[in-house]
Image: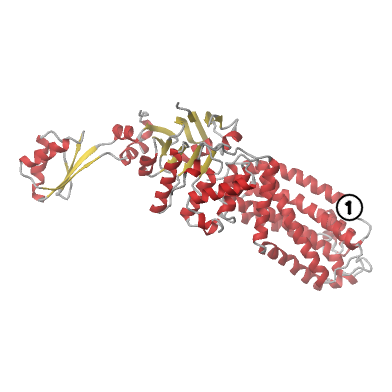
Amino acid sequence: MTETMIEVAGLGRTFGALRALDDVTLTVPKGTVLGLLGHNGAGKTTLVNVLTTLLPPTEGRASVAGFDVVRQAHQVRGRIGLTGQFAAVDEQLSGTDNLVLIARLLGASGRQARARAAELLDAFELTGTGRRPARTYSGGMRRRLDLAASLVGRPDVIFLDEPTTGLDPTSRMTMWRIVAKLVDDGTTVLLTTQYLDEADRLADSIAVLSGGRVVASGTAADLKAEVGQRTVSVTLAEPDDAVRAVTALQRAGLHPVPDPAGRALTTPVTASRELAVVVRALDEVGVDVAELAFSEPTLDDVYLALAHHGASTPTAA
Amino acid sequence: MTNTSAAAAPTVPGWRGSSPRTQILVLTTRSLRAVVQDPRLIVFSLVQPLVMLLLFSQIFSSVANTPGFPAGVGYIDFLMPAILVNTAMQAALQSGVGLINDMRNGVVARFRSLPIRMGSVLVARSLSDLVRTALQLLAMLVFATLLFGFSPAGGAAGVIATLALALVVSWGLGWLFLAIAAWLRNAEVMQMVGFVAMFPLMFASSAYVPVANLPGWLRAVATVNPVSHAVDAARALTLAQPGAGGATTAIGVSLAIAAVGAGLAVRGFRRPLPR
């Protein structure tokens, strides 16, 4: 049973002459995380705004939790949670009062609302600060309160627009843990980020957005296989060995690139077993190796390859 | 982080929305809480009208001896209805400023993603400001009675009628400022617009000096100025003098402004937030 929670088809949004979204098509199955990757101005926030009914699309259609974002905006709003780039909490109110307010607006009774607020403050490690006005909160606390606020109604789909931008590493880790837990509990998440490790870590599938278009999509592994490169990097014990090392590796059928400093070189490989080829080739000519490292392609490679020159690249996967 | 399952727990059905009545009630209470939690809001909003009351009652008291002035009336009794109307108008401007602050605060951004009507947010703002203005005007009346010897011929009934009239004016004008706020979305510009509009309207009127005493051109302006009509009606009620029928006109104009303002405010408020 793979129920679709977000369905987007041929979606476009223009602002005057600017095409902020151009023919975007994607689907997100229930209980999964879609990571939307792209640099500033790629259209991530515009897409989130359209899907959360804050902004009408100019073409195409989109549905969230089975409801059309234009014609059934009210139903969509009853089933989603949104955590934007800027904390949307009432700074004058305490954490508790913020959450109670939202619960009441969603239709909870006073007692249910207070119970839900206490539950969320506890879950988000904000218990001790529930009575303080939100303006006295630190950045990380405010984001957690904001996320708690978007979960009050137990939404089916959560939109997180750059949830960890500007947070310190500890707060980021806390945020990641919370998101992972939400997904475990069956919530569907759409997450935008500029951080590749974040997408790599949280997302089941990734869509790379550039100039308002989806230029690549698939799992992190798909994208890496498509674009990235596995490499072996070698640090030599003796700088003088550089030339001999390069020749030896070339003889073994590799294409090493020496580091300008002379002591190191890297070579692309197709699989990790070629590590042995490198070791053997260098051993045969008696070159001493100080350090040897194998690296998997990172999303950075994907990102750099696609996000900047992506417009002409066909969609992967 | 042992308890995060509470955050999602899909076994419990989610809440999907509330009636507009509940929305208005909850949102009005929210705004009024801010007043209760921070009474400075009321205290500081009283400073300006009190200073005006003090200064004007001293500076203009000799006006009471001029030919155009109603016979047998103390200047404070003449002045107080105008101060009430003026304070009510200032409160209407603050209503717009309050809406802009909410938009900046981030709380409006949250409301927009919830299944609530944007109209509820505006109605709640209007209602809570009405309550706040009522408290403010009552406090003014207490000060005027205790400290300035305000004791008009219209008695309690006249004063209550004046208070009600001032509140209707404030409420109607409040919608106009909510509309301006919803389209402008900038507190500084809003204050400026308010200041530029309010000052001439207030002074080129019958508020502080009988219209007959004004120079010719200003008298012409003051005669057509809607504020004059509101002040004249308020004054007639307070002093138990003829002319209270003007209150009907003042209420009619206020309701018309409210209707137009509310329509524009909802349209302006629905536009997407920037960013």
The one of B55 and B221 positioned closer to us in this rendering: B55
Residue A234 sits in quarter: top left
The one of B246 and B38 positioned closer to us in this rendering: B38
* Residue at the image point whose x is 79% and y is 62% from the top: B138
Residue B162 sits in quarter: bottom right
Where residue B137 sits in the image (x, y, percent)? 77, 61
Point out the residue furthest to the top here.
A1
When the figure is inspected, residue A60 is found, relative to residue A49, above or below; the finding is: above
Where residue A237 sits in the image (x, y, percent)? 11, 50
Please name the colour scheme applied to the rendered image: secondary structure
A211 left or right of B188 in image: left
Which residue was labeled with disc 1? B246
Residue type (three-letter) at the residue carrying disc 1: Gly
Where residue B8 sits in the image (x, y, percent)? 50, 41
The one of B132 and A194 positioned closer to us in this rendering: B132
Point out the residue furthest to the left here.
A285
Counting labels gives 1
Q: Secondary structure at mark 1?
A: helix
The one of B263 and B35 positioned closer to us in this rendering: B35
B104 left or right of B146 in image: left
When the figure is inspected, residue B76 is found, relative to residue A47, above or below; the finding is: below
Residue B94 in view of the camera: yes
* Residue at the image point whose x is 62% and y is 39% from the top: B17
* Residue at the image point whose x is 82% and y is 53% from the top: B226
* Residue at the image point whose x is 38% and y is 52% from the top: A169
Residue A43 in view of the camera: no
B232 left or right of A92 in image: right
B177 left or right of A25 in image: right
Label 1: few (<14), some (14–19) or many (≥20) C-alpha neighbours in 10 Å: some
Q: Circle 1 marks a residue in which chain?
A: B
Where residue B222 sits in the image (x, y, percent)? 83, 57
